[in-house]
Amino acid sequence: MTTRHFLSLMDLSPQELDRMLDRAIEIKGKQLRREVYEPFKNYVLGMIFEKSSTRTRVSFETGMVQLGGHAIFMSPRDTQFGRGEPLEDSARVMSKMVDGVMIRTYDQSNIELFAKYATVPVINALTDQFHPCQLLADLQTYREHRGSIQGKTVVWIGDGNNMCHSYINAAILADFNLHIACPEGFDPDPAIVQRAGDRITLFRDPKEAINGAHLVSTDVWASMGQEDEQKQREAAFSGYQVSPALMDLAASDALFMHCLPAHRGEEVSHDMLDDPRSVVFDQAGNRLHAQKALLEFLFLAAK
């Protein structure tokens, strides 16, 4: 039995990613046709949430039910994750009781330590460094609307955060060019940027970065745990709001994405999410289908 984990997009090969996106679209079609597909009856996914989330909980829990299994939600009050019991012991114990573990937490090193000692698949549902499940949904959404993203130009506008890091990894695997527009002091991790080589170009001017782009994506300026930096970040990112006027500088068939929740009037104008070029709600819904394809991939690898 081979235990595969999904701690970042780099745990997949380009070929595996490509097949997973196609499979996500197939699974979505089954669901829209109300076809019953329950290959994982009696499977249980343990879901550890140190960081709360609407979309992550609903998508994983719904996905497990639709696959014939069950999901157990565990808040920080319900687990010893990161406190008390060593993570190594928690991983060993949970591996005896569930078929997979999804973790949404702060420190990437904690999820990596947990996975090292787990004998069931471990899924990164968000850390401060990466958000790989969101990128599966983003890439699926682009594929559905525009086809292959290979060779296209994608623009990330905003903080060099976990989403930005995952877009960098996606550029490597899916072979697209990534423009990153962020103010000084908010660049992505240089080591992660370096791995992508000449696929990545850094900009300080969003207007310059977005010129001719096929996909534009952004995120909130202050993520969970950064609330005390809100005012400082609002000042630093004041010129980085995505609006229909800014989108007009992109390619004529450009799409706009946001991982949500969005702060209208900050990183996006009040009307951007409702613009015809916005696919943010398709993108959000695809979390369900992309993650079902991921669960299928990991569970079948473990058989």
Image (tube, rainbow, N blue to C red):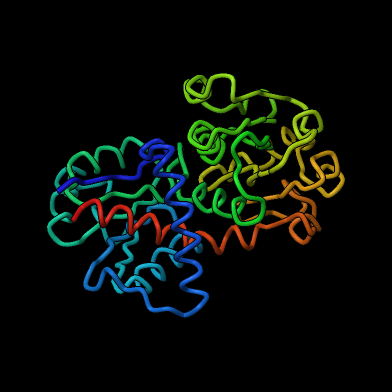
Residue 178, x across and y down, in percent: 63, 31
The image quadrant of residue 37 is bottom left
The image quadrant of residue 246 is top right
- Residue in the image at 21% along x and 46% along y: 3
Q: Nearer the viewer, residue 214 or 146?
A: 146
- Residue in the image at 52% along x and 75% along y: 32
Residue 245, x across and y down, in percent: 87, 45
Image quarter (top left, top right, bottom left or bottom right) of the C terminus: bottom left
Q: Nearer the viewer, residue 8 or 190?
A: 8
Q: How many marks?
A: 0
Left-right relation of 272 to 136: right
Check the image and report above or below for 164 versus 242. above
Q: Nearer the viewer, residue 78 or 127?
A: 127
Left-right relation of 257 to 139: right
Left-right relation of 63 to 254: left
Check the image and report above or below for 36 versus 28. below
Residue 223, x across and y down, in percent: 56, 45
Residue 280, x across and y down, in percent: 65, 57
Check the image and report above or below for 96 versus 179. below
- Residue in the image at 79% along x and 58% along y: 275
- Residue in the image at 40% along x and 35% along y: 10
